[in-house]
Image: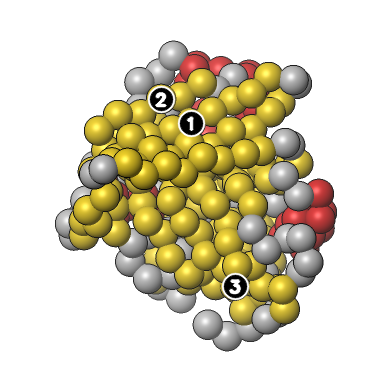
C-alpha cells in the first residue's frame, strides 16, 4: 500500500450482524455514498477485536501498541471512475486510549470514544472463548463467543465474505464532503461458532435510534482470526 499511515494486526474479531431498516441509516450516509446491500438485506455490525503491534508511519508509539476496540458499523459503496469501492461507516468506535481517540477524530474525522475496556481469550481442549468488555456510565457491556479452533475458508459469495471484505472507511463530514481512507488486508478465515452472548446497552452506547438492537436477534455471528492490516492516508471529496 502506498502512503500507509498505520500498520497493525486486527485479531479475533467478533462480528455480530443485524438486518436493519435502510431508513435508519440514511442520515449517517456520507456524501456520494450509497448503502451496500447483500441478498436484499441491509446490515449493521457490532464488532469487537484486539488491535496489536500498531505502528504509525512505521514507528511504535509507547503504551499504544496493543488495545481493544469495539465499533458499530454499516456498509456502503462509492463509485469512482466507473468502479465501485466498498467500505464501512462507523456509528461509534470505542477504545481505551485517549491518544488514539484524539488522532482518529482529528485526522480522519471519525467518531471515537475513550472508555475502560478489557478482553479475555481462553482456550481449552478443542474450544476457545473470546470476549470483549467496555464500561459506559459505570456499567460493563460485553460480547463473547464460544468457537472451535479449526480455521475455515470463507466461501465465495458468502455472507462472511460480504461482511469482512469492505476495504475503505468513509465518514460523513457534512452534506457536501466525505472522508475516505483505504484498509488493506488479506482474505480472512473464520472459526465455527458454538454459542455467543451479548450484554450491551445500545441506547447508552449508540443512541436512541439503535436501542431496538438490545432485543433484536442477530442475523449471524462470526469469529474471524484477522490478520495484519494497513490503513492508508485519508483524503476528502
Relative to 5, 230 lies left or right: left
Disc 3: which residue: 7
- Which badge, 3 or 2, comes first in the chain's sequence? 3
Q: Nearest the camera: 63 or 185?
A: 63
Quarter placement of the C terminus = bottom right
| Residue 21 on image: x %, y % | 43, 27
Q: CA distance from mark 3 to mark 2?
A: 31 Å
- Residue for point 74% across, 41% down: 113
| Residue 94 on image: x %, y % | 66, 41
Disc 2: which residue: 197
- Residue for point 59% across, 25% down: 141
When the figure is inspected, residue 150 is found, relative to residue 124, above or below; the finding is below
Disc 1: which residue: 143
For the residue labelled by badge 2, is the local secondary structure a helix, a strand or a loop?
Answer: strand
Relative to 43, 209 lies left or right: right
Query: Is mark 3 in CB contact (under 8 Å) with mark 2?
Result: no
User: Hey, which residue is sitting farthest bottom in the picture?
Assistant: 2
User: Hey, which residue is sitting farthest front in the picture?
Assistant: 125
Counting the numbered discs, the total is 3
Amino acid at each position: 500500500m502506498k502512503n500507509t499511515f498505520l500498520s497493525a494486526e486486527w485479531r479475533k474479531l467478533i462480528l455480530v450482524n443485524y438486518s436493519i431498516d435502510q431508513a435508519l441509516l440514511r442520515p449517517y450516509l456520507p456524501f456520494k455514498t450509497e448503502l451496500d446491500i447483500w441478498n436484499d438485506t441491509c446490515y449493521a455490525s457490532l464488532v469487537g477485536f484486539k488491535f496489536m503491534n500498531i505502528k504509525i508511519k512505521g514507528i511504535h508509539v509507547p503504551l499504544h501498541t496493543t488495545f481493544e476496540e469495539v465499533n458499530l458499523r454499516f456498509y456502503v459503496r462509492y463509485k469512482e471512475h466507473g468502479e465501485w469501492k466498498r467500505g464501512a461507516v462507523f456509528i461509534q468506535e470505542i477504545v481505551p486510549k485517549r491518544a488514539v481517540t484524539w488522532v482518529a477524530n482529528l485526522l480522519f474525522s471519525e467518531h471515537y470514544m475513550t472508555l475502560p475496556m478489557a478482553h479475555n481469550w481462553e482456550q481449552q481442549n478443542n474450544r476457545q472463548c473470546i470476549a470483549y468488555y467496555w464500561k459506559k456510565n459505570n456499567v460493563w457491556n460485553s460480547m463473547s463467543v464460544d468457537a472451535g479452533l479449526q480455521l475455515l475458508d470463507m466461501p465465495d459469495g458468502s455472507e462472511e465474505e460480504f461482511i469482512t471484505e469492505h476495504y475503505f472507511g468513509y465518514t460523513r463530514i457534512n452534506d457536501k464532503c466525505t472522508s475516505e481512507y483505504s484498509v488493506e488486508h488479506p482474505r480472512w478465515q473464520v472459526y465455527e461458532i458454538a454459542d455467543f452472548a451479548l450484554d450491551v446497552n445500545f441506547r447508552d452506547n449508540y443512541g436512541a435510534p439503535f436501542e431496538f438492537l438490545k432485543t433484536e436477534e442477530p442475523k449471524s455471528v462470526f469469529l474471524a482470526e484477522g490478520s495484519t492490516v494497513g490503513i492508508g492516508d485519508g483524503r476528502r471529496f
